[in-house]
Amino acid sequence: GQNIDQPTEMTATEGAIVQINCTYQTSGFNGLFWYQQHAGEAPTFLSYNVLDGLEEKGRFSSFLSRSKGYSYLLLKELQMKDSASYLCAVYDYGGATNKLIFGTGTLLAVQP
Amino acid sequence: GAGVSQSPSNKVTEKGKDVELRCDPISGHTALYWYRQRLGQGLEFLIYFQGNSAPDKSGLPSDRFSAERTGESVSTLTIQRTQQEDSAVYLCASSLSPHLAGGPTDTQYFGPGTRLTVL
């Protein structure tokens, strides 16, 4: 089966740091994506991890541990505009398959 | 350049009617995907096109759902005899061919979606 878990909602304060966790159990794995989705808008690409470790991109970092089936997205120096849903997705690629398997998303509210 | 576009942005239909949803991918992207996002749920994969062929249709929920792609460009998702449970946001994404990109590191870029409401 395919199972991707992330918290439903989180709240954080402007200027702070927040970590959004994602655990996965999937039949295929070719990497893990994080997307940001503001209400009523398209998901936008944030990061991709295929090897274990931390990938840093400005205020956003993403970590992957394949042995633990675990990833997190770290957001630093939070801004009000970071209020959005954050989607964790496993990339399953091989043979005829080429798709993203998504968790339900974490709705982050940044408060002043 | 232009991103992925979808039309219509909103569609309200009556149960039992057929609907067509359109996707225009990013120019030059040979891979195209359809996903569905029901209220309070994660995105569900529906179908994947490589060029005009669909090697993976495993996510289509029933035979009422079909999709085609022409000219390695525009794609249409058709839902026949719509049911209330079909109400969702239908998202399209495109990416460069993973084969040309040299491996499975192919970022999917999403359109804004079509919000379908079946009354």
Image: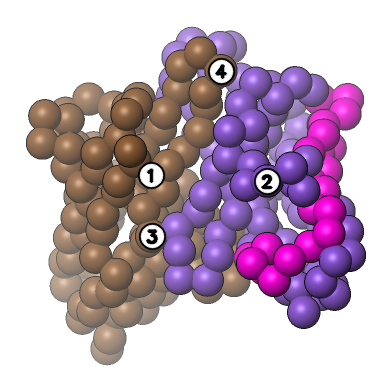
Chain colours: A brown, B purple
- Provide the residue designation for mark 2: B62
- Eye-nearest disc, 1 or 2: 2
Query: Where is the N terminus of chain A found, in terms of image quarters?
Result: top left
Chain to which the residue tagged by mark 4 belongs = A
Could you tell me residue B89's position as x and y percent?
64, 63
Residue that carries the numbered disc 4 in the rendered image: A96
What amino acid type should be assigned to the residue bearing mark 3?
Answer: Thr
Crowd tier of the residue under label 1, counting other residues whose Cα lies within 10 Å: few below 14, some 14–19, many 20 or above:
many
Q: Which residues are magenta?
A: B67-88
Q: Residues within 10 Å of mark 2 (few under 14, many from 20)?
A: few
Look at label 4 and name its amino acid: Ala
Q: What residue appears at the point 56 percent right and 60 percent down from the top-left corner?
A: B37
**Label 3, on which residue?**
A104
How far apart are the two marked residues, 2 and 3, measured between alpha carbons? 22 Å
Q: Which mark is residue B64?
A: none
Mark 2 element type: loop
Measure how far apart labels 4 and 1 are at the Cα level: 19 Å
Residue lying furthest left: A68
The chain letter under disc 3 is A
First along the sequence among labels 4 and 1: 1
The relative height of residue B33 versus residue A72 in the rendered view (above or below) is above
